[in-house]
Each structure stands twice: as C-alpha cells, then as structure tokens.
C-alpha cells in the first residue's frame, strides 16, 4: 500500500508544478449587474461542461421551527415552473445526454448539471427559470414531503450512528443553528407546508444571493454573455437580509452523552470540539487544524491509529476529522472504536492519553512532510475533475471565502509549521467546548 | 416547627371553606373589542388596587440572535413616551403614593403598580400610553443596555451557580428557546439596538396580546369602564403571529456536564428532566409532578432530605423542584449537595438510589395528606395578597391557561392519588430526557 502511494506520488510530483501554475489562470470571475457572482473554470480536455448554481442559503439560514425547509425546497425545485412540467427539468437534461442533481448543506444549496458544452445556454435558461418561477400546488408539497421524510428514515432513523451524531451536534451548539440537522427534525418536517417553502424561496433565491460556477470546455466571455442573457434580467432581491446567524455564547462545561441502541454492533467514543473555521484572509488556524486532523487520524499511518490500532491493539479504528469550510464555527472530532474487552471509558482514556503524549512530543517532521505531500497530491488530483473544481469554488464562495482564499489555501497548508499545529491543538482541545459521546449497544435500562 | 405548622393549619382549615367558596365569585373576566383580556379580582379589605398589564410575550418569543431583547424592552418602557419624560412614569406613581415595577420571564412580560384605588384610571392612562407610544433615542438605548449588561454581570457572571444553570438549560433544550437565558447571552446583549427593541415592541405590544389584571377594592363594572376608556381605543395588531415555538425533537441521550469554577464553595449534583407542563383542560400530570416534587424534596420532611440529610447524613441539602406553569415543556429537577467526603459521583448515586427506592415503595399516604394540606394552606394564604392573586391569574393566562384552569387547579391537586404520582415519576425520570450537571470547585485542568 505504501509502495503504491509512493509511486502515485512520484507521478503527481512530476505533473504538479505545471498544474499548480495554471489553476489561477484557468479561473475568471465576474459579477452581473444584479449582484450574481460568476466563476468560470476553463478545462478544455473534454467537450463537456459542469453548470452549477449555488445559493448562499442552507439549513442554518432557516427560521426556527421549520427545520428541513432548505432541503425540502431543493427537492421542490424539480417540480414545475410556468414553462416546465414537474420532472421535465431532469428529463430535458437526460434527453440532452446530461446528468443533474442538487445538494443542501448548512451554508449552501446547489444545483448542477453535467452536459455537452453546446447545451450550456439551455441549462442556464432552465436554471434561471426556476430561480423565480416555480409553480407548486398542495399535491406537490404532500408528495415531496413524504419523500424527504422517507429520506430521513433511511439516512437517520434507521442508522443509530446518525441519530447519535444528531444528538451530539445538538449538544455541541448551545445557540447556533448548526445544532439543527440539515435534513430537519422529523417533528418539524411533517408540518412543512407550501408557505414555509415559498417563504424560504422568496427570501433567498435571487441573483444577488447566488454564485454561478461553470467549469469545462468554455471561454469566459461566452459564459459571461450567456449568463447575462439568461440570469441578467432577473432583478436583485433588495430585501435580502445580511447573513448573520446567532453565535455561540462561551461554552463553559463539557457535555457528555451516552446513546444506546440495540442496532449498534460496534460501540465507540467520539469527542467533538467547537473549532474555528476558515475565515477570509485568515486561514492559518484552520490550516493548522486541517493538518492536525491528518497528523492525528487522517490515515492508517497517523498517530491515533498507529498507537491504538497497531502498537497497542486496543482499537479497531481511531481517527480525527475536521473540515474548515464553514461560514461559522465548525467542529474538530476525534473517535476511538475499541476492540472487544476494552470499555468505552478505557477507550476515551486511551484516546486522551495518546493526544496528550502527542502534544508533549510534538509533530514528527517526517510524518508532516508526507502529509503535506499527500495533501498536495490530492489537490492536484482534484484538478482532473471539473466537478470537484466547481465544487471547491462554489462551496468556498458560499461559505464566506473569496477566490483569493481558495487560491491561497494550498500554499498556506504547505507553510504550516509543527509549532503552529501544536498551538492549534492546545487551543482547540478545550474540554469546556466539547461534547463527548458514547455510542453503545442497548443494555438494561438504568433509572 | 412541626407544631407551629399544625397550629397554623388549624386556623387555616377553619377559614378555608369560606374563602374556597368565594374566590371564584371574586373573579370577573371581560374581553374588550380590540381583543384585550381583562381579569378583575375583587378584594375589598383595603382601599388599594394592583394594576397589572401582562403581555403574552417573553424571552422565548424572541427572534434568534437577539436574546435579552424582551427584558431590554421591559427596561425601555420606563423611558419616555410622547406625553412623559424618561423616568416620569415611576415618579408619578410614587408621587401618588404607589409603587411600580415590571418583570420578564420566558412566556410573559408584565408591568404593575400598587396604588390607591382612585388612581386606577391614571395608571391605565399611563400604561395604555406606553403600550404604543414609547419614544426612544440612541442615548436611551446605550444607557439602558449598559444597565441590563450590569444586571447580567451581577445575577449571572458573578454567580457560578447561575452560569451552571444556564449551561444546563442550554443542554436541556435541543431546539426550544427555553435553552436561551431570559436575560440573554452576553455576546448578543452587547449588540442589542433600537431596531431590535422596536421590532419586538411592534410585534408583541398590542391589546390583543395583553391581559389586564386588576385586583383590589374595585367593582368589575368600574374597571371595565376605565379599561374601555383607556385601553379600548388602541387598535388590535392584525399581524400578531400565532404563538408557536420550535418544539423539542425526541431526546435520545442523557447529557452530562461538569462545570468548574474557583468561586464554588459548595459542590453539588443537579439533574434536570424535560417534563410536561400544565395544559388547558389537562392538568393532572402536572399536578402529579407538583406533588412528586413536594413528596421528594419540597421540605425538610420530604423523602430526599429525610434519607440523605437526616438518616444517612450524607447530604447537607437535597431537594426537588418543578413548576408546571409554562407554555411549553418545562423541567423537573433534583439536586443533592453532599457533605464533605462524599464525592459528586457518590452523591448522584445516593440520589438515584433514594428515588428508585421511593418508586419501589410508593408514596407514604400520611406524608401525602400532610403535603396536600400544606398546599391548600399556602393557596389560602395567597388569597390574602392582592398582588399574589393578580400574579396567579396573569401568569396562568399568559402561559396558555384559562381562568377555569386556575380555578380547577387546587381541586386537581387535592384529587391526585399516590398511584398517579408514581406513574408520573416513572414517566418523567427518563434519562434520555435529562441533563445531569456537576457543579465543582475548579481543580487542575484535565486534558
């Protein structure tokens, strides 16, 4: 396995300098007069294009009491408009040899199609149409509400680990809406109605709240002309509110919770800490945390698995996770899945001991070099996919970052020192900001 | 002490039947054409009157991100109107021999004056004036914001037990705004501005969202005439939203937290369970929980103190608390303050053991009779105070109950059986719905 990575690395290294020089040149940005941002990523290797429309609105922008409405609306955008019958949007994409889909997160909602380049104008025409002209009736609402509730059943209710994560996130955030699941609380989803969906739509779906990302075999001027033609006539929403969510108060006491479910086959302990995110012009702390997660638990050669899985054989899996791409404070997580015979209390102590030793010992410079190399490699791999590139820019621009931040990020990651990683660890591993959760197999009920 | 209570009891018992017959006759209700509810409580023993104006709006009705604005606005209502200079309201009350104040809770905000009966019209004139005509400038805002921040400093920041309760409540509620402190999160209070206060004022301060309670030496017709004269001309707010807050999702995992502060002199363990509240026409469960709190920990003769303080001498204080007066789900709490040498873990186990034994053993009927007697006595005592009576009706009517519910409550309490109390205990003591908190003296920081 190691050998394979090394070989792949050699190949990438040869290619990397060339690509690293060109990515910034491949990207062109515009803003339409109605406030819509446009990002064009040229990639002329195949006569295809990815057309993505991102809204700066996700589940964390919902009003209280209507959780899930952002994702619900995402589904409803595949119903009809004045021009299109329900379902016709995707049928046209398919009939033109393309694929399409959509996604909702805390901070954004996105719609995309991958299609032959000469159909880009058609995609824009249809996407611009459904930005303002959706036509919904009660029947659509009832049908699609059943669909999202079934989606929740499959993704959450039937998965004790997902339920556990929901309860953990709710305990992590005392005030900020990241404590509410993206898909919604079930008891609120069942009451979502047409008015809720339209209120969200009218508030957030407008050109001055959107980022258009087009990646593929296109020239920037052509994309701009098409965008002006199709999106340009849509008026800006003058009533678009400033984007600000309730912030966390000081967290002063670690929360601990134990979630038991008979369906749990493999118990584990997970700890989640409130953590800073990537901020525009200020990404070093997030970069240090990104490397910290890799050093501690990003792969099987990281500190936690090396110690707990291989040296001590007390864990079947141990890891760390962090994603700095977030509008507001995010989380840094560590997890330890003990071998049979090791209790969750012991597993927690193991994890804490290894982390404390790590902070004491410092970062292994050889390991850090390898991780930086791998990060660079994976970033280079991403350049091979128009879809990944488009998502990189779309997600960043709807999470409060700029194109400049996206371009600076790889270099910042490479420049992070071992001392910065340890300082970031010392700052983030504050138990007052943490939730520690045990996922257990259901046992006898205690009083 | 016991002897004293028994003597007092004998006195009350003699008086009780008479008063119990009359309280319903003392109460008259009206509704003005603009939707304002009026409750008149006749009490002719002294030529004084309590004039209270309650709004069906408290901190739990705030928008996210502006916590504390309900209480902030309560302060601002003592600034000027078109007719009155800042501070003049209270000066006039004082000049007329009266006292005045106000209060804010999760579910209501209230303003009151106690004054000679012949000044009731003047009070209404001034109170009606500030329902719609407050005049605020930036200077008022800045000054009064400092005042509420200082109030928070004194009540919360300087009191580790208060900080601990805030963190516990935030962990108790995953979705409902009762997780936000009434006084507000400090980081949001410092940003409260004129627009926030006026938005809340315009949304909630209107006659169709208010309950006027007048208790004292007055005749209902006189009060109605005065109310029509002063409050009647104020138009209803047609845009008043339906009163509905985000509800809790299923709570699936007990939260535990440990709060450490060097200022803590006396560590303790507290557990809070999500619990049903008094609902209109449906108060039996809340009545059973009210009695459960009394049986377990309402006084020094209750189960928890008897066992832990007196029999075993392992606690310096043990108690239980519950208030069913709440618009949405409330909490049931138990607390144990161990003697030195008993750890908080042991204190928690003690508490749980005593409660488990209690559920096993059942309610002591002699104890229950004594508690019912004491409840009746305290309710009768309340009749002696116009102020207490006015608050009873005002709080109930702004917490979703009716006058009929208020009148039924004492009888329901008396009719609760030991079996209902045990059933309520078995239902409410569900650890998935609980937060268990340790309040500790600060120790060495653990990783």
Image (cartoon, coloured by chain):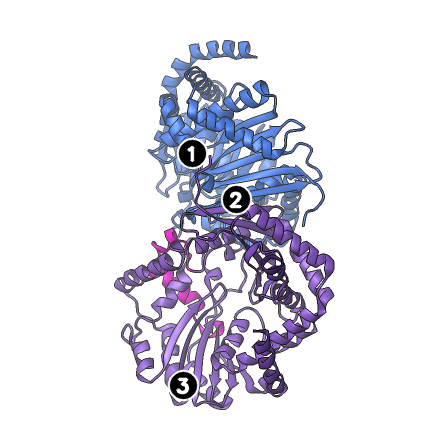
Chain colours: A blue, B purple
One can see residue A220 in this view: no
State whether residue B420 is above or below residue A244: below
Rendered residue at 65%/55% (across/down): B354
Q: Nearer the viewer, mark 1 or mark 3?
A: 3
State whether residue B26 is above or below residue A335: below
Mark 2 is surrounded, within 10 Å at the Cα level, by few (under 14), some (14 to 19) or many (20 or more) other residues, namely: many
Q: Chain of mark 3?
A: B
Rendered residue at 68%/73% (across/down): B369
Which sits earlier in the primary sequence, circle 1 or circle 2? 2
Write the start and end of the magenta stretch as one range: B183-209
Q: Position of residue B31 (x, y in %)?
A: 52, 80
One can see residue B408 in this view: yes
Q: Quadrant of residue A339?
A: top right
| Membership of A129 in magenta stretch | no
Label 2 and label 3 in one chain: no
Q: Nearer the viewer, residue A280 or B395?
A: B395
Q: Which mark is residue B5?
A: none
Q: Position of residue A48 (x, y in %)?
A: 51, 24
Q: Which residue is mark 3?
A: B120
Q: Quadrant of the N terminus of chain A?
A: top right
Q: Which residue is mark 1?
A: A396
């Amino acid at each position: 396995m190691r050998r394979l990575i090394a070989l792949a690395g050699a190949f990438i290294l040869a290619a990397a300098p060339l690509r690293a020089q060109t990515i910034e040149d491949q990207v062109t940005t515009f803003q339409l007069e109605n406030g819509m941002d446009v990002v064009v990523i040229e990639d002329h290797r195949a006569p295809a294009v990815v057309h993505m429309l991102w809204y700066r609105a996700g589940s964390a922008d919902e009003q209280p009491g209507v959780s899930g409405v952002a994702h619900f609306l995402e589904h409803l955008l595949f119903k009809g408009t004045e021009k299109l019958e329900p379902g016709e949007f995707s049928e046209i994409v398919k009939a033109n040899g393309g694929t399409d889909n959509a996604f909702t997160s805390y901070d954004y909602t996105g719609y995309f199609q991958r299609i032959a380049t000469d159909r880009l104008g058609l995609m824009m025409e249809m996407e611009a149409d459904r930005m303002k002209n959706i036509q919904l009736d009660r029947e659509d609402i009832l049908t699609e509400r059943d669909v999202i509730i079934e989606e929740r059943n499959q993704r959450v209710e039937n998965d004790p680990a997902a339920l556990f994560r929901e309860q953990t996130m709710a305990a992590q955030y005392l005030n900020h809406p990241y404590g509410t699941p993206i898909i919604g609380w079930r008891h609120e989803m069942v009451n979502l109605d047409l008015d809720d969906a339209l209120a969200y739509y009218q508030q957030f779906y407008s050109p001055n709240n959107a980022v258009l990302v087009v990646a593929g075999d296109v020239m920037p001027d052509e994309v701009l002309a098409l965008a002006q033609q199709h999106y340009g006539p849509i008026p800006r929403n003058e009533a678009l509110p400033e984007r600000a969510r309730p912030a966390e108060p000081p967290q002063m006491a670690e929360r601990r919770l134990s979630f038991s479910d008979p369906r749990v086959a493999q118990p584990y302990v997970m700890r989640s800490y409130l953590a800073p995110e990537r901020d525009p012009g200020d990404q070093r702390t997030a970069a240090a945390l990104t490397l910290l997660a890799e050093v501690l638990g990003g792969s099987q050669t990281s500190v936690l698995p090396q110690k707990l899985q291989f040296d001590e054989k007390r864990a079947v899996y141990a890891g760390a996770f962090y994603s700095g791409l977030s509008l507001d404070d995010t989380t840094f997580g560590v997890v330890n899945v003990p071998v049979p015979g090791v209790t969750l209390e012991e597993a927690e102590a193991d994890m804490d001991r290894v982390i404390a030793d790590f902070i004491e010992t410092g970062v292994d410079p050889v390991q850090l070099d390898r991780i930086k190399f791998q990060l660079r490699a994976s970033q280079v791999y991403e350049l091979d996919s128009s879809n990944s590139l488009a998502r990189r820019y779309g997600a960043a621009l709807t999470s409060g970052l700029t194109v400049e931040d996206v371009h600076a990020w790889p270099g910042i990651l490479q420049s992070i020192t071992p001392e910065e990683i340890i300082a970031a660890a010392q700052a983030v591993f504050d138990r007052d900001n943490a939730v520690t959760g045990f996922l257990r197999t259901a046992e006898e009920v205690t009083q």
